[in-house]
Image: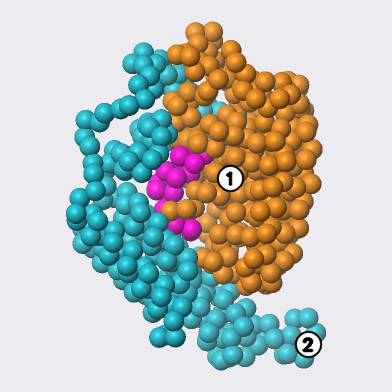
Amino acid sequence: MGKDSKLQNESSGRAKKVHPAVIAAWAAFIAISSLVPVIPVIGSGAAFSLSDAAVVLAGILFGPVAGTLSAAIGSFLGQFIAPYTAVFGIITFLAPTLAALTAGLLMARRWQYVTGIFGLVIVVWLLFPLGQEAWFQIFHWIFAIIVAVPAGIWGVGLIKTGDFRKMFAGVFLISFVGCMASHGLGCVLSLPVLQLPREVWLAVVPIVIPQRIAFAVLAGVIGVPLLKLFPRIGISAGPELLAPGTGRKRSV
Amino acid sequence: MGVLLLLTLVIFIVTDLMLIGILFFMVVTVWLMARLPIKILWQYCKMLLVLFVILIAMQALFYPGKTIIYQPLIPEAVPLAGGLGKISREGLIFGIIISFRLLTLVVLMPLLTMTTPVEKIALGLIKMGLPYTAAYTATITLSMIPILQNELAIIMDAQRLRAFQIFDRGNLFEKLKAYPALVIPLIIGSMRRAQSMCVAMDSRAFGASKKRTFLEDISMKSSDWVVLVSVALSAVLVVGIYYSDIL
């Protein structure tokens, strides 16, 4: 099965690309994972879902292009399955898509772009009067920038080692930054829609980082076995899709 | 899709109770005209009810309103926490506006998905310039979702049969440790299915021809243009009223 299916995955001269069927399978997983609650949102009766971890794994497993496409499709369809979670309407899917893009860019060792994304989030946040009132929020994204640099430099290397603990560390670092990117865009979108007062932003400050750490741990515990298993069933994923060190796609 | 994006943009901009009320009324009218079950609308309201209560409470407590309808629980003279617990009329109204905006945004999407077949949405997206591969990927994703949902339910039932109750009763850490047992068989199963699909697609030379033809074609009819232009004009009117001194 292994060798044959690898050929199936990389057939018809599209060896450098992830096959649309594989992208679709992951997108379907993202869509249904929006129905699996993980972390309850205190007092609201709602919960953060498994899809928050699934979208960053899209970037880690399939890179910045295929992973982002998979996350965009999965999240877009997920908001149709569970419309009550789409609090920003039809553009709700943009936040998880950014998470996948960020994780994918880190997998391609393009951490400079990731710092640019967070820089943009900070600038847009500060453009809103409510954002200026809740200026302390930007420290979350500054922290994410600080983590993004080692994640971009060493993340893929750690994943490539093949050692479970080191792989977990790599996936965790990259996932954490991806989750923070999703948080950043979510916060920016919530400024015009929810217009939450400064006091609410202040109250959630201690929760943000631990919550994203929990998502990153979840991405790690799911992602590491998948990075080990995918090549065995003939699916090219993770560093295997990228040429060593360059971040460019490997020609087979 | 264009109408949906326009309305979303307007809802993002407008923060006036009357205008949001009108928008919500319009959306509900279209919902009723499309003969969609009102029960679903009510379900969404119930699901979001707790969130609405929280949003209204937060705005009522923290919005810098001048008309106080409930005096602070803690006297103003107390340092740091002084004045906490006062409820303003403006805050209460603003909380209601925000809740209405949220509900309007949430209700907008099913209007598209419940009235238009997926194939037509995908075709529409292609006509709007989305690459065929991306649109087709979205279509096959849709066909995979019910299969995966079914498989997820089967795996969860199988684990419950083996007295595995962490997802029902476990704490966060137990759940985090238990997720691979639920998710990995599901993903591996769906990837194996995707591999069979890869063979089927490649054996039919998927993507070989750049110029595609469609069994069913769609184009903008005059009625579509009328709807699009009238929604665009209404959107401009609503935003214009919002920024003018009329209200």
The amino acid type, in three-letter code, at marker 1 is Leu
Q: Main secondary structure of the magenta part?
A: helix
In magenta, the rendered stretch is A71-89
The circle drawn on residue A98 is 1
**Chain letter tied to cyan:** B
Q: Is residue B224 visible?
A: yes
Is residue B12 left or right of A143 when viewed as pictured? left
Protein image colouring: by chain
> In which quadrant of the rendered image does the C terminus of chain A lie?
top right
> Which of pointers 1 and 2 indicates the residue nearer the eye?
1
- Label 1 element class: helix
Q: Quadrant of residue B202?
A: top left
Is residue A133 left or right of A44 when viewed as pictured? right
At x 64% / y 66%, what residue is drawn? Answer: A127
- Circle 2 sits on which residue? B78
**Chain letter tied to orange:** A
